[in-house]
Image: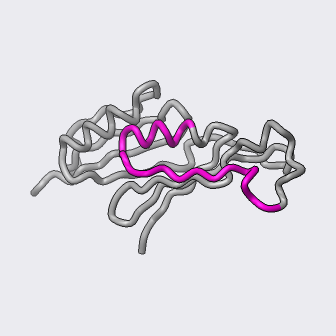
Amino acid sequence: MTLNPYLNFDGNAEEAFRFYQSVFGGELFVQKMSQAPGMENLPEGEKNRAMHVGLPIGNGQFLMASDCLPSQGHILNQGNNNYISITPDSREEADRIFNGLSAGGTVEMPMDDMFWGDYFGSFVDKFGVCWMINFANPK
């Protein structure tokens, strides 16, 4: 099984994913609403929104997203009901990802050794997406 988180944005999916690409690397795929069949009648302000954005984040996994279309009744409700949990291969990689993605955001728990034995931290990035970084310390 592969888990591919899919996020929704309100017009800034491409901007968010260019930021995520600066941390994870990889080749960014962006398809605009204007490129999809049947979207010719969208309001001009929505034609440049992302229909689909994909970024490989390792081992066959992708972070994916799209922008909402207000003209179609889509309403973005950001909240803390979804976190993306990342399990890096080292403490150094945990720190690099945490520091990169939390820049401009709000740190909930700084990276630290936790009572359950792992190195963990959580934050909300500058786009309102909630993240957890959890490195399983060697036993």
Left or right relative to 31: residue 139: left
Q: How many marks?
A: 0
Q: How is the image coloured?
A: one colour
Instruction: Between residue 125 and residue 53, name the one nearer to us.
Output: 53
Q: Position of residue 74 (x, y in %)?
A: 79, 49
Instruction: Between residue 40 and residue 97, name the one nearer to us.
Output: 40
Residue farthest toward the left in the current orientation of the protein: 139
Q: Position of residue 28 (x, y in %)?
A: 48, 50
Q: Is the residue 59 above or below the residue 33 in the image?
A: below
Left or right relative to 64: residue 86: left
Residue farthest toward the bottom in the current orientation of the protein: 1
Res 61 quadrant in image:
bottom left
Q: Residue at x 63, y 37 (%)?
A: 12
Q: Residue at x 32, y 40 (%)?
A: 97
Q: Is residue 27 magenta?
A: yes
Q: Position of residue 57 (x, y in %)?
A: 38, 54
Q: Is residue 14 magenta?
A: no
Left or right relative to 43: residue 120: left
Res 112 quadrant in image:
top left
Q: Position of residue 64 (x, y in %)?
A: 54, 55
Residue farthest toward the right in the current orientation of the protein: 41
* Quarter of the image where the C terminus is located: bottom left
Instruction: Between residue 16 and residue 35, name the one nearer to us.
Output: 35
Q: Is the residue 138 above or below the residue 80 in the image?
A: below
Residue farthest toward the top in the current orientation of the protein: 104
Query: Magenta segment, which residues?
Result: 15-37
* Quarter of the image where the N terminus is located: bottom left
Q: Residue at x 45, y 24 (%)?
A: 104
